[in-house]
Amino acid sequence: MEALFTFFAVALGTMVFPPILLFGFRVAAEYERCVVFRLGRLQRVAGPGLFWLLPFVEWQRTIDLRTITVDVPPQDAITRDSVTVNVDAVLYYRIVDPVKSVVAVADARSAIHLAALTSLRRVLGQHELDDLLKARGAINDSLQRLLAEMSGPWGIEVKAVEIKAVHLPDNMQRAMAKEAEAVREKRSRIIKAEAELEASEKLSLASRKILESPAALELRRLQMISEVGAEQNTTTIVLLPSDFVLLARNLAEKVAGVPATAA
């Protein structure tokens, strides 16, 4: 009887224990790590590859070590100069310590998501609207440092935080459009005034050159006549120098026998 009992025990063990042993094998991908607990106590970090768990005594939590992208939903915030803006951002992070991500925080992903939301509002409240529109890189760096300080104890590394878009109220957009138009008009007037100043300086220099050489005035007049003649005009008015008019009058009076007019 004892021999029969031993035979059944060996047979039962042969049939039961191999499946149980096979049931304990696990496989972790290259980008995964498994935090193993034994009866509730932290035991080790397993993976990547094939590893074995003691059935019914050990269990695991699988952690993804790849960089995760989080689309932060649009958030309403008030800047330091009391302007209400709607901002959405994107967060890049990865888990670098699997043990901390499991033991130190209940849900690492949810924690970093909520931290990104609160940090975004906090940092925006410390900057003015012009900084948000023109110095976005500095705000991104501030957000990254703040999130890194909060998520470090959770075993999370914040790779980057980028503000995607800034949505302004309609009245603020109209005010900024008017300001930009005024700036463009100011720039246009300054350019026009500078051009007129330069032209006046050139004309002043030309007048001095003509005073030094009166023949230059006549050459310029002849050039102007040729330019006018090149156009399709029916009437052309030519201004003659007073010397020519006086010379023509003296010749006419001399031919008529009238004493010449004094110059």
Image: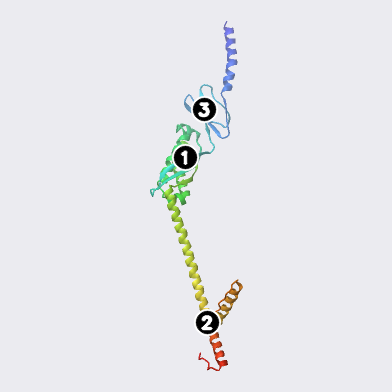
For the view shown, which residue lies furthest in the front direction?
256
| Circle nearer the N terminus (2, 3) | 3
Residue 136 in sight from this viewpoint:
yes
Foreground label between 3 and 1:
1
Nearer the N terminus, badge 2 or badge 1?
1
What residue sits 44% from the left and 40% below the top? 117
Q: Which mark is residue 228?
A: none
**Alpha carbon separation for disc pair 2 and 3:** 101 Å
According to the picture, the residue beneath numbered tag 1 turns out to be 73
Q: Position of residue 221 (x, y in %)?
A: 56, 78
> Residue placed at 47% from the left, 27% from the top?
41
Kindly identify which numbered label has been placed on residue 212: 2
* Side of 56 relative to 121 (left or right): right
Tell me the kind of residue under disc 2: Glu
Relative to 21, is 210 above or below? below
Q: Which mark is residue 60?
A: 3
As displayed, is residue 30 above or below residue 25?
A: below
* Residue 87 position (above or below residue 49): below
